[in-house]
Image (cartoon, grey):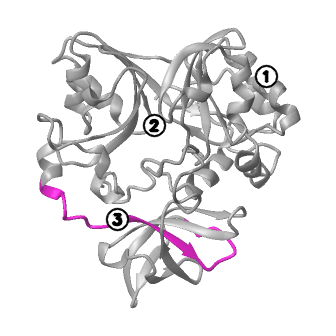
Amino acid sequence: MSKRQSALNDRHIALGADLGVVSWNGMPIPQNYRTDPYDETAAVRYRAGLFDVSALRMINVSGKDALAFLNHVLTSDISKAKPGDSHISNIVDENGALIDDVIVYVDGPAEFRISHGGGNLDKAFAAEAGKYEVKVEADNDVHILSLQGPLSLEILAPHTPLDLSALPYFHHAKSKLFGKDVRLARGGYSAERGYEVFCSSKDAPFLWDEILKVGKDKGVMPVSWACLDIVRVEGGLLFFPYDMTHGDTTPWEVRADWSIDLKKPDFIGKSALAAKKGKERSLITGLEVIADKAIAPGAKVMAGGKQVGVITSTTYSQHLMKSLAMAQIEPSHTRIGTELKIADDREWSATVVQMPFYDPLRRRTHPEGASA
């Protein structure tokens, strides 16, 4: 995969990032700044933090058969989404194994933008697009700035003509921000209220600087991908493929039943998913570990001296003052309150708890009171 570059690299370097250390999706990312990731997490939880998530890949899908094409390759029914919706879905292979997770931004009846992570969506799209009257184009210019935190609305709203307060969760709209053409989406990966700014590469540095400038007196700060990992684990948010340990993990095994519509006409992997429903080898499960540190991903989950699972994503949450872990665990050991052992550098005690760990009713992302 060719190396992509963020137009914000000079900002990241000035903040202390070593862009030669970590790349994701073909783009070097600011894994760490000079600031403490826990201080950055406090900014996201109490004020707002600004992430550069331009490493996400964006694919434009348009044409007469765009909807039919997407419904053929994705597990959910895109026809149920309306223009302005941001629709979460998954893509599986013929065996029902997850190969990528996506967000579909519905711009019109035949115009869609697809955001995806580090999976094989590109290959799957390329293999199927020729069967449809559809145009599939990568957008390597778009940059995505993500302002996450309880003050994000207050910071952005005065600088866009869009009534940002009226934009529902997981919706988006075309508008301007600080006079620049953008698309604004309500969502993010932080378990807080937040907004993503989709802009051109040439406008990204200006918008980054302006957001930080107007937010300075409110304590807004740039935040790294190390912070992103802390807040997303606290929020029980999965990261493909790290939380999919089987190699052929199904959506059922990551509790993504809501992303599958077996009632829609045939789609790739439909028959396999139907056959595997109820036959989960493991389920993604939340654990609180009695430890003063984050447990290493890959550690074994034990019960009665037998391995019953594997740790996938972890963090030590200073905000919650707990060691948190997500794990793939045999269904028989996933009941809340189940006591387990973790075999890492030593044996640790752990208890199955409800996910998300932080804000279990998701009232931070849904301040209107919705619990879904």
Visible in this render: residue 144? Answer: no
Q: Residue pushed farthest bottom?
A: 304
Q: CA distance from mark 2 to mark 1?
A: 26 Å
Instruction: Judge from the rendering whether residue 174 lies leftward or rightward of residue 126; answer left or right.
Output: right
Question: Helix or strand or loop: what does disc 1 sit on?
Answer: helix
Categorize mark 3 by other alpha carbons within 10 Å: few (<14), some (14-19), many (20+): many
Percent x, y of residue 285 = 42, 66
Q: Which residue is mark 2?
A: 117
Instruction: Judge from the rendering whether residue 315 lies leftward or rightward of residue 208; answer left or right.
Output: left
Visible in this render: residue 312? Answer: yes
* Mark 2 or 3: the one toward you: 3
Are the residues tagged 1 and 3 within 8 Å (C-beta)? no
**Residue range corresponding to the magenta coloring:** 275-296
Residue 276 drawn in magenta: yes
In the rendered image, the vertical position of residue 372 relative to residue 312, given as above or below? above
Give residue 155's quadrant in the image. Answer: top right
Q: Which residue is mark 3?
A: 283
Return the mark for residue 209.
1
Q: Residue pushed farthest right?
A: 217
Question: Helix or strand or loop: what does disc 2 sit on?
Answer: loop
358 or 369: which is nearer to us? 369
Categorize mark 2 by other alpha carbons within 10 Å: few (<14), some (14-19), many (20+): some
